[in-house]
Structure formats: structure tokens, C-alpha cells
Image (cartoon, grey):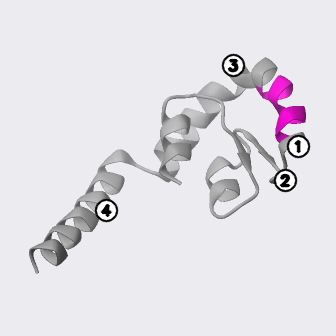
Amino acid sequence: PTVVIEALAAGGPVLGTALGGIPSRVGETGWVVEPAAEALADALPVAGRDAAAHSDAARARCLATFPPDVVTRQLLKVYEGLGRRAAG
């Protein structure tokens, strides 16, 4: 999910659930828990307390894994394809 990449790029703490591509995007720079309200609630205090320690690592991982120029080119291709489909 794009929001995970955006949060990492901003150096923000990422607390996500173990669904879809979230775990691979978060890596070791955030927290991944089971998709249950109780698991999220238990992890919130830890994430809040340790967020600053993960900030620089999160940003560095994001820039290395998702270089802005590459991501921009990929998004442009998607939007151009959608534009062509819409134009019919």
C-alpha cells in the first residue's frame, strides 16, 4: 500500500497488519502485527515509545527500496494507461 511507503519516506512510525504487501514494505523499520484490534492496541504504546529510534532507518529503507525517480516513472505509466483506457 502506498500509504506505508509515504509514512516510511516521511520517517514516520509504521504500525501495520500482516496482510498483503504490508510486512514486506515495513520490514524491520516498523511494527507488523496480526490483523486483530487487540494486537494493534497492544502494539500502539510500543510503537509510540520507540518511533524516534525507527525514524531514520525507515526513511533510509524507503529511499533505498523505493527510489523516488523510479516510483514516479511507474506511477506515470499507470496514469498514462488509465488515461488511454478512459479515452477509449
Identified by mark 2, the residue type is: Glu
- Say left or right for 50 vs 8: right
Q: Identify the element where label 4 is drawn.
A: helix
* Residue in the picture at 47% in, 42% down: 63
> How crowded is the residue under tag 4: few (<14 C-alpha within 10 Å), some, or many (20+)?
few
Residue, disc 2: 34
**Pointer 1 or 3: first along the chain:** 1
- Say left or right for 59 vs 55: left
Per the model, the C-alpha gap separating discs 2 and 4 is 30 Å
* Residue 34 point in image, percent of width and height: 84, 53
Q: Identify the element where label 3 is drawn.
A: helix
Residue, disc 3: 52
Q: Is residue 43 magenta?
A: yes
Checking the image for residue 39, the label placed there is: 1
Per the model, the C-alpha gap separating discs 3 and 4 is 31 Å
Checking the image for residue 73, the label placed there is: none
Residue, disc 4: 74
Per the model, the C-alpha gap separating discs 1 and 2 is 6 Å
Q: Which residues are magenta?
A: 39-47
- Say left or right for 15 vs 49: left
- Say left or right for 13 vs 67: right
Proximity of marks 2 and 3: CB atoms separated by less than 8 Å: no
